[in-house]
Amino acid sequence: MSVALGTTRPLPVRTTPIRDPGNLLASLPRTAPYAWIRHGEGLVGWGQAARTDIPPGRDRFTWAREWLATVFADAHINDTVQTPGSGPVAFGTFTFDERSTGSTLVVPQTILARKNGRAWLTTIGETPLETFTPILDPGRVSYGDGSLTAPAWEHVVARAARRIRSGELEKVVLARDLLATAEHPIDVRLLLLRLARRYPECYTFSVAGLVGATPELLIRRTGQEIQSLVLAGTTPRGTSDADDLTRGAALLASAKDRHEHECAIDSVRHTLAPLCASLHTPDEPELLVLPNVQHLASHVSGRLADGASVLDVVAAMHPTAAVGGTPTHKAIDVIRELEGMDRAGYAGPVGWIDAHGDGEWGIALRSGIIEGRRARLFAGGGIMGDSDPASELAEAQAKFRVMQYALEG
């Protein structure tokens, strides 16, 4: 279903520079907030100028691109800022599995943005007056098993590791879910504020009920320049500074984690090379240290050859080995067989695109789906032939703590 406001006249879009608005997330009304924030910069939005629920299937990114082209073509744009993220912007979330329903694109009626020392406001059509109500606390939060209990998930990990050792595939990423129920309705704005404060290095996002803070940048397009951050290989933070350093050094030296990371880099390199006139991938990963975990990380950069939009690049890259496995098509089959749940938007692309094809998209990790008093949280990790089920469960539990912190403070 698609919705667009307005009549047969083009949608009037106006973007003007404004003074620094302060904390962007503090400006959001409670109803359906959209957000993409890192280090206090980015975009937030509310209202709905246009929306579509994208049909599942192999051509869903093409379908989404064509829908966006129609919406943006029908806009009369007065943009005095002229920078990536100004003018009309669509926020989007795509399900991990192309067979699943739930992929959505939304063009908010109001967009507030700040980046590189500039701030601007975009309005589309006649924007309604919003009531900015106080942010509410969800109260007590209780947790219950999702699709699988912890022991059942460990059993699934062991089965996957055996299949890898048999030579069926090199790596598979398995996820699990956790159900949370709050005493009061969950205010997404509170989760966003907590996530942005606690995890400033991550991209804090909210699109169509999917909320989280992902460390993994799938792709950024600015003109013809693109950037990506590849994460694969994880260890929990230490209990002391010395323990932290020891864990980081062990992660860098881990043959299992280095191989997992190389699989992810190879996947990105193979996908981006045909789209790029130039592409750089580092020879060695570095450590990305977050409040709850450490990752092996590699920064990838390049220049597009044919003017593809950011959504075209997203379509080519998803799913990466970092969230699917190697070889990807076989890993997806194993995920469907063993995981025992629909990931929905977890580990799928989430982000934004403007009318010029610029934008930023991440992989929806460290996230949950919020509905009233309930939240469905997700976490996972890369499984290799020598993976230990108990260690993989501990890694997933460490990743759950991101959204648990957002809910409980």
Image (cartoon, rainbow, N blue to C red):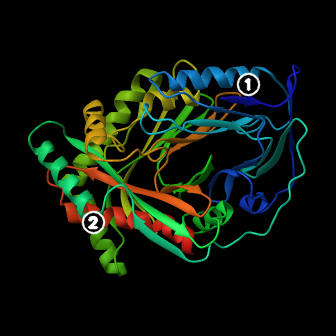
| Left or right placement of residue 273 versus residue 9 in this view | left
Q: What residue is shown with label 2?
A: 249
Q: Which residue lies furthest to the left in this view?
A: 166
Q: What residue is shown with label 1?
A: 71
Q: Nearer the viewer, residue 286 or 148?
A: 148
Q: Separation of disc 1 and disc 2 at Cα?
A: 50 Å
* Marker disc for residue 214: none
Q: What element carries label 1?
A: helix
Q: Position of residue 382 (x, y in %)?
A: 28, 50
Q: Position of residue 74 (x, y in %)?
A: 80, 21
Q: Nearer the viewer, residue 348 or 251?
A: 348
Q: Where is residue 108, by image quadrant?
A: top right
Residue 40 at least partly seen: yes
Mark in the foreground, 1 or 2: 1
Q: What element carries label 2?
A: helix
| Left or right placement of residue 406 versus residue 339 in this view | right
Q: Is residue 185 above or below residue 121?
A: below
Q: Which of 374 and 47 is in front in this view?
A: 374
Amino acid carrying label 2: it is Ala
Q: In which quarter of the image is the C terminus?
A: bottom right
Nearer the N terminus, badge 1 or badge 2? 1
| Left or right placement of residue 245 versus residue 318 in this view | left
Residue 200 at least partly seen: no
Label 1: few (<14), some (14–19) or many (≥20) C-alpha neighbours in 10 Å: many
Q: Where is residue 69 in the image (x, y as percent from the top left)?
A: 68, 21
Residue at the (32%, 72%) spot, across then down: 245
Q: In this view, does 16 lie above or below 377?
A: above
Label 2: few (<14), some (14–19) or many (≥20) C-alpha neighbours in 10 Å: few
Residue at the (74%, 54%) spot, across then down: 31
